[in-house]
């Protein structure tokens, strides 16, 4: 397992939410205000007092099902789906105790863990109902059978352990005598139980409702039954211990701890489409994790960025079901697209947003109004390539051939023979590759050839790209030789132009860009879980820079030659040609956002300061 302090790159700033996968467990310590969270991808993050981003990151490589922080946040314990348990120091991330297991079936998975307030014991409850308690200094353990529910909790002394039996009734275990202390029978069986902060009372919750009991004598003090719905998924105490929030599939219901009276004015719909059950009550209120990867509440957890795009001052972030639009340093709006975008494009004049989804038709939206203005239909599914320039959208169809539409004139064209294409950023020229690898330059308004066919060096063309704001064409052939064609000569003299070989590229290239100004081109190399972007100096015919280890969906802004990369924490990261981090655009929860660079904040929404505390 890898354990590390998070290196404070630009992306790490203003990002208390590090997870880009559903949060499976959470623990908050009200005394120190330390927060620990875990996700399905096997990442555990710890946000300690005074940090604006988690400074401690654990990567056990397997999903953690339960977390616990000791009082004052000194120790962190977790249990994973293999049945392993671990305890680490929160100040420096050093291990204190581990019992590791190989995968061995669902029964081993840990459904709950607890570490005693003074840090001398740890307890874990497995799916098979076995409760184990370890002395951390010696590693000695005891095992108890017949336990159930989804939670266990030490009292302030660490000598009593609170849990449930398989029938949903409270079990208060005295660890000095290994005996059960008397507790009244619950009228409504529970699946979660916890002590109040002062450990004088017990709160038990289940599908039927919530109950309050006194520890001394085990007396049942009151109950509150739920009516209809799916029951209570989790309960969390307020940092001052005076209130408890019961979380259902749709709502947060708040009760006073003293008498279990509902506080209707504080109850609300939480907005999580499918809660995972992980939740906490921090300084900003109740936070609820959802299966969509979001954390609902006043936490800085926006929807993960799945794809990026951009040109000039516009940046696009693709999320599940929508696209975020940024201009300059400000967030503009979301465009609801109803699908997961695989690739995003914007035209040079910032009028149109093109979405090429993982599943579904190619769509065009008006950037300013967010209205859909074009749907490519069923045969645009899985389009091999797409482009938008001016008012023209072009699609290489998976079934073969090229279709393009002039949106301004509402005219569509189709050719069955092209095997590749490139559209100029202004929509003036459409370059197409013939089945034999030749290249023709067409006028998108009528499909007619506008300049003589460029002369190739006898090797079929594979990729094309026009240079932004110049009459130049870049061509990568099947021998991976990059060539440059000055089409202004053909326009002026009406003669075929011969290309100038620039460089031979080693490696498989899947994307080619021509950068404004004409000095640089960029190519992308797919490398499995990552990719590399290389910038080529067209004038001096050499490699200028190469940046490796990038997100596989990284893109290049052909206007400014910047690398755009999806980043954790619902962000898009901009890099210079040499890979230097330049700027981060981050979506936060509740519609808030922030943009920052190496010198700090560049812009932020009005509610940003409240989210960041």
Image: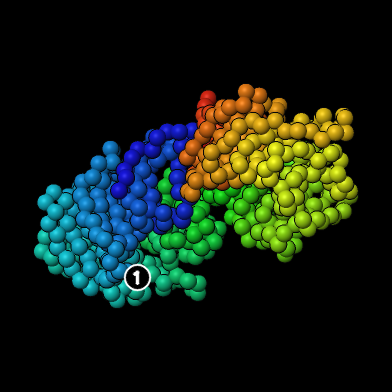
- Give SS at disc 1: loop
Q: Nearer the viewer, residue 558 or 152?
A: 558
Q: Position of residue 236 (x, y in %)?
A: 39, 56
Q: Is residue 445 left or right of residue 164?
A: right
Image colouring: rainbow
Q: Position of residue 314 (x, y in %)?
A: 68, 38
Q: Position of residue 15 (x, y in %)?
A: 48, 40
Q: Nearer the viewer, residue 285 or 579?
A: 579
At horizontal 57% and vertical 37% (from top left) the residue drawn is 505
At horizontal 32% and vertical 51% (from top left) the residue drawn is 60
Residue that numbered label 1 is attached to? 190
Q: Position of residue 39 (x, y in %)?
A: 41, 54
Determine if residue 591 is in view: no
Say above or below: 146 vs 137: below
Say above or below: 235 vs 10: below
Picture quadrant where residue 109 is located: bottom left
At horizontal 53% and vertical 41% (from top left) the residue drawn is 507
Q: Is residue 341 left or right of residue 166?
A: right
At horizontal 25% and vertical 41% (from top left) the residue drawn is 94
């Amino acid at each position: 397992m890898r354990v590390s302090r998070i290196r404070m790159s630009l992306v790490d700033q203003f990002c208390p939410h590090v997870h880009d996968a559903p949060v499976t467990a959470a623990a908050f310590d009200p005394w120190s205000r330390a927060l620990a969270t875990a996700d399905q991808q096997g990442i555990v993050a710890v946000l300690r007092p005074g940090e604006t981003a988690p400074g401690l990151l654990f990567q056990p490589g397997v999903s953690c099902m339960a977390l616990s922080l000791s009082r004052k946040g000194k120790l962190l314990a977790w249990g994973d789906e293999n049945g392993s348990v671990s305890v680490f120091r929160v100040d420096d991330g050093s291990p204190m105790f581990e019992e590791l297991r190989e995968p061995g079936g669902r029964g081993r998975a840990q459904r709950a863990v607890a570490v005693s307030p003074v840090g001398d014991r740890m307890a874990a409850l497995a799916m098979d109902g076995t409760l184990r308690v370890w002395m951390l200094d010696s590693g000695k353990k005891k095992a108890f059978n017949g336990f159930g529910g989804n939670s266990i909790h030490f009292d302030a002394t660490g000598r009593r352990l609170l849990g449930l039996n398989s029938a949903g009734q409270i079990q208060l275990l005295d660890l000095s005598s290994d005996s059960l202390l008397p507790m009244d029978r619950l009228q409504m069986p529970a699946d979660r139980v916890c002590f109040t902060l002062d450990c004088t009372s017990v709160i038990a919750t289940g599908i039927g409702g919530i109950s309050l009991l006194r520890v001394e004598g085990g007396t049942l003090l009151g109950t509150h039954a739920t009516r209809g719905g799916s029951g209570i998924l989790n309960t969390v105490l307020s940092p001052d211990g005076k209130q408890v929030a019961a979380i259902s599939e749709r709502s947060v219901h708040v009760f006073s701890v003293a008498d279990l009276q509902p506080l209707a004015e504080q109850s609300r719909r939480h907005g999580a489409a499918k809660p995972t059950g992980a939740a906490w009550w921090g300084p900003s209120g109740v936070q609820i994790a959802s299966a969509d990867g979001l954390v609902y509440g006043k936490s800085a957890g926006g929807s993960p960025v799945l794809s990026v795009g951009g040109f000039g001052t516009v940046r696009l972030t693709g999320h599940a079901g929508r696209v975020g639009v940024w201009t300059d340093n400000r967030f503009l709006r979301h465009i609801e697209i109803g699908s997961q975008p695989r690739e995003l494009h914007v035209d040079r004049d910032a009028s149109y947003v093109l979405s090429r989804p993982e599943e579904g038709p190619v769509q065009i939206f008006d950037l300013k109004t967010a209205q859909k203005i074009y749907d490519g239909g069923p045969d645009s599914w899985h389009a091999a390539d797409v482009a938008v320039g001016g008012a023209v959208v072009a699609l290489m169809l998976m079934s073969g051939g090229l279709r393009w539409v002039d949106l301004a004139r509402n005219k569509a064209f189709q050719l069955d023979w092209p095997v590749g294409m490139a559209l100029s950023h202004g929509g003036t020229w459409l370059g197409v590759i013939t089945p034999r690898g030749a290249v023709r330059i067409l006028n998108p308004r009528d499909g007619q050839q506008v300049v003589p066919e460029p002369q190739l060096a006898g090797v079929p063309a594979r990729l094309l790209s026009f240079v932004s704001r110049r009459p130049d064409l870049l061509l990568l052939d099947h021998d991976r030789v990059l060539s440059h064609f000055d089409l202004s000569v053909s326009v002026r003299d009406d003669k075929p132009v011969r290309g100038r070989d620039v460089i031979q590229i080693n490696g498989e290239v899947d994307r080619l860009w021509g950068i404004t100004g004409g000095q640089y081109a960029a190519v992308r190399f797919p490398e499995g879980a990552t990719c590399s972007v290389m910038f080529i100096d067209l004038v001096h015919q050499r490699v200028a820079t190469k940046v490796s280890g990038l997100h596989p969906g990284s893109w290049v802004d052909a206007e400014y030659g910047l690398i755009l990369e999806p980043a954790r924490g619902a962000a898009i990261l901009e890099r210079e040609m040499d890979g230097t981090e330049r700027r981060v655009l981050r979506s936060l929860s509740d519609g808030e956002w922030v943009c920052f660079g190496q010198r700090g904040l560049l812009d932020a929404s009005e509610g940003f300061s409240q989210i960041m505390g």
